Amino acid sequence: MKRSRTEPRRSAAVTCAVLAPAGPNRSRILSSLCRDERTAELPTYSVLSKMFLDHILRPAEIKVFEKTLKPHQLAQIALSTNDRLSSTLGDGELVEGASTRTGPTTVLDRAVMEHNVLASSRIYNNISFAGLGALLDLTPGAAETMARKMIEQGRLKGHIDQVDKLIWFEAAREEDDAQGKAGGLGDVNQDTEDTGSLFTKRWDKQIRMTAAHVSRTLPINHFHRLTLKQRSNHLYNTYLRTI
């Protein structure tokens, strides 16, 4: 099958992965797509790779991605009455320049905000409601509501301190790219060495499983007689059967 015929399918797969709810299931899909070298040819690869690496997405990058979406993929979403009430600004939260948005307005908006919450958990030990709200362009109450829902659904590990208005993240320390306090307002903790991201470890494990499967399905002396292209195709097909 020619690449020109498969490109729309791969592009659709990337779009679905980006719009999916942030969490472990989406991370597994992002990993599979990023490891496919053909995905790098797509115009949406930049957003895909940043999501895979748990980088925070900026508005300018989202606007470029938004142009590739179809009308039904930009569907409007409505907030529940409870969410709207809990997301309104309190009297002590009226700060000049602060966002007054009480929640995401589209499916893409929600996907990006949830991703940025997850990305924040890889960077900080904790973050204030106001700090997360500034990052997401939401009111502090709306940011707390989004994080609370993700924790309830098992898509974010952490707990919420209502007294100090802090969200504490419970990610494994060796899986974090960096560490900080109170939304980046404190000192960075450098006591532990960064040993690599979670998905890199998962990929290394997948490579070992693929190599073991190759050795069982193809004699090593026959493998050495294959051309470089034949070896690549065989390894790729074997990988697909192991995921």
Image: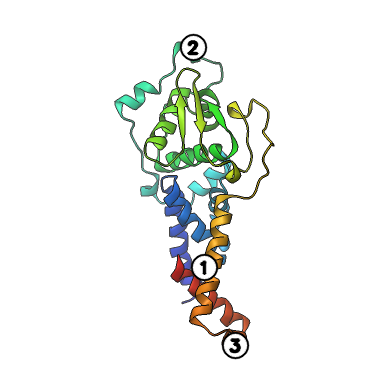
**Residue ID at (57%, 44%):** 61
Q: How is the image coloured?
A: rainbow
Residue type marked 1: Met
Closest to the observer, 234 or 213: 213
What residue is pinned by disc 3? 221
In space, the residues marked 3 and 2 are separated at their CA atoms by 73 Å
x then y, percent, for residue 17: 44, 53
Q: Locate residue 86 relative to residue 138 in the image: left or right.
A: left
Of labels 3 and 2, earlier in sequence is 2
x then y, percent, for residue 52: 54, 51
Closest to the observer, 65 or 152: 152
In space, the residues marked 1 and 3 are separated at their CA atoms by 20 Å
x then y, percent, for residue 31: 51, 57
x then y, percent, for residue 94: 50, 14
Element carrying mark 2? helix
Q: Mark yes or no: residue 137 visible.
A: no
Element carrying mark 1? helix
**Residue ID at (52%, 64%):** 206
Label 3 or label 2, whichever lies nearer to me, is 3
> For mark 1, does the 10 Å Cα neighbourhood hold few (<14), some (14 to 19), or many (20 or more) residues?
some
Q: Residue furthest left?
A: 81
Of labels 1 and 3, earlier in sequence is 1
Element carrying mark 3? helix
In space, the residues marked 2 and 1 are separated at their CA atoms by 55 Å
Up/down of 126 relative to 162, above or below:
below
Residue type marked 2: Gly
Q: Which mark is residue 45?
A: none
What residue is pinned by disc 1? 209
Q: Which mark is residue 92?
A: 2
